[in-house]
Image (cartoon, rainbow, N blue to C red):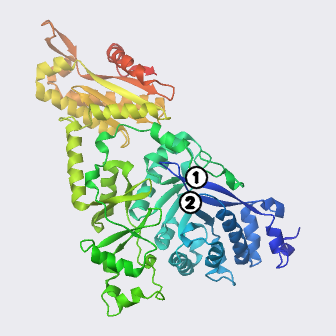
Amino acid sequence: MSSSKLFTDENLSLLLDKLDYAFQPIVNTYNGKTFAVEALIRGYQNLGFQSIPDLFDNFFEKKILYKVDLLLRRKAIEKFKYIKIENIKLFYNLDNRLLFMPDFEKGNTTKILQELNLKQDSICFEITENGTMQNKIMVNKILNNYKSEGYNIAIDDFGTGISGLELLYLSEAHYIKLDRFFIRNINKDSRKKLFCSSIVDMAHIMGIKVIVEGIEEIAEYYTCKDINIDYIQGFLISKPTINIEHIKSSYDNIPNLFENDRRNKSNNLIDKDYIEYIEPLNINSSLHDLFLYFKEYPNNNFVPIINEYKTLIGVIHEVDIKKISYSQYGLALAQNVSFKSKLSSYLKQTLSIEISWGIDKTLEMFNLKGNQSKGIFVTKNGKYAGFINVNNLLSLSYKRNLEIAQNQNPLTKLPGNNQINNFLNESFKNEQITHIVYFDFNDFKPFNDYYGFRQGDRAILIFSELLQKHLEKDTFIAHIGGDDFFIGFKNKEFEFVYKLIAQIQEAFKNNVSSLYNEKELQNGYILTKDRFGVQRKFSLLSVSSAIIEISNKSKQENFDKIIGKIKKDSKEIPVPMGSCILM
């Protein structure tokens, strides 16, 4: 079949009938409710093409890309209309090259939606990084046009192109979709986790929600949940389906996973007393309703805007409407039905956090936002729940710092037993491999008795500083008490842990030598009484260690039985290592 004769005006619609759309659900990370579906073309092989890009390249070359896109858009929207789930969106991939078609014009999607009795905010256009920056002015113009008409914008495959951040800045998108490359095995790749976590934080500060594609494994889900991804898409939830009857309103495996992964965060929950409920306004309200709102609530200088499903979609600041509201004819214009000023014209995206994120993440996000914000909005399962003002955030910060201080070891300032218990509980629930290392000084009591408590504290501080110097920032370091320390590694190979611990033990042995007198250093021992009052030789300070490997087959009840044995074994096995137990 010749590509030059493939499509004509006469047979175009007939040929496109050979194409169909499959839909893949995009669901809430926490409750598994279906938030949207993405339309994915199926049947391109029926037209003699090997891939979807080949298909669209042909449309582009013939300069009929926009005409074809409108036909396909109608096909996708018509099929979407019959999905019997309330309050879901259709994510539709927009080929950016259609902007350069000679017959491109605005308003056609709105006509389709009006015919089908659907609202503009039910459609989200996905644009990609690749090829979008050829004409920045035109791209920015068309994106603003779609947004002004009430459509949502998502940046697809974020992170794969070189212009992603610039596109994010220009588009002021509602959503970004992280490419599946970054999600595959994210639970085993600390660099992917760091990259995605940074992008998520940046997006949330800008009021943008984050979707990840390609989740297939439970461990990937848990990592995405940990870095506060808003919505997820992938085979773990559902494969794309042509039959819309197969699309569910919610997917029970997700809330079950969420509940099963609950950790002991009782000290990190946001007390509802800190959350103020500011009366919201519906996005379908009139400009006149907005004027009346600020008169009814004179102490409010902004209003949260929600849709009919109580989803927080943005905020309107009183200062942005003062020019109209205080003008001579402002009120009359607002009351005039023919004056088509929509609230969306004044709507701004805003920083919000899910209540399940807890105090620490809330404070972190607010601090990243800086002085621009008067507080932070709170949602619960995506629905508007209230607002935490600056004063309450400061109170939360003080309370949290006090709790942390109380749980820290007073000498080293490292986390104590409560945090250790939390780390252990989490480790037994995760799919990933965790290595726990227990440290105990050798002959510390004789040293402490001989040189005094001050020198003993210095030895403990030397070891604490060595741990923090040698270990990566995401390593859990804790001080059990006295000369006992605890560290935890996630997603590290045993050989890596073993070598690193040996280096720390050797470094401690060298560094702690500065605490001895020259005579004891030359002798290689101190002469003092043991616990029974008998004078004898004690070796210079060193540290023993024991490594425990926890996998998805490990049982937490076995840990308590093992920990006592470790302390004994670590003393009996010569330095530089100690014992190693695989649970």
Horizontal relation, residue 134 to residue 12: left or right: left
Neighbourhood count class around disc 2 (C-alpha, 10 Å): few under 14, some 14–19, many 20 upward: few
Q: Position of residue 384 (x, y in %)?
A: 39, 60
Q: In this view of the protein, which residue sits in the foreground, 300 or 7?
A: 300
Circle number at residue 249: 1
Against 248, is 107 above or below?
Answer: below
Q: Position of residue 205 (x, y in %)?
A: 38, 62
Q: In this view of the protein, which residue sits in the foreground, 16 or 452?
A: 16
How far separated are the C-alphas under marks 2 and 1?
A: 8 Å
Q: Secondary structure at mark 2?
A: loop
Q: Position of residue 134 (x, y in %)?
A: 59, 76
Q: Which quadrant does the N terminus fall into?
A: bottom right
Extreme right residue here? 1
Q: In this view of the protein, which residue sits in the foreground, 207 or 34?
A: 34
* Residue contact at pointers 2 and 1, CB within 8 angstroms: yes
Mark 1: which amino acid? Ser
Circle number at residue 86: 2
Which residue is at 48% across, 85% downward? 340
Q: Secondary structure at mark 1?
A: loop
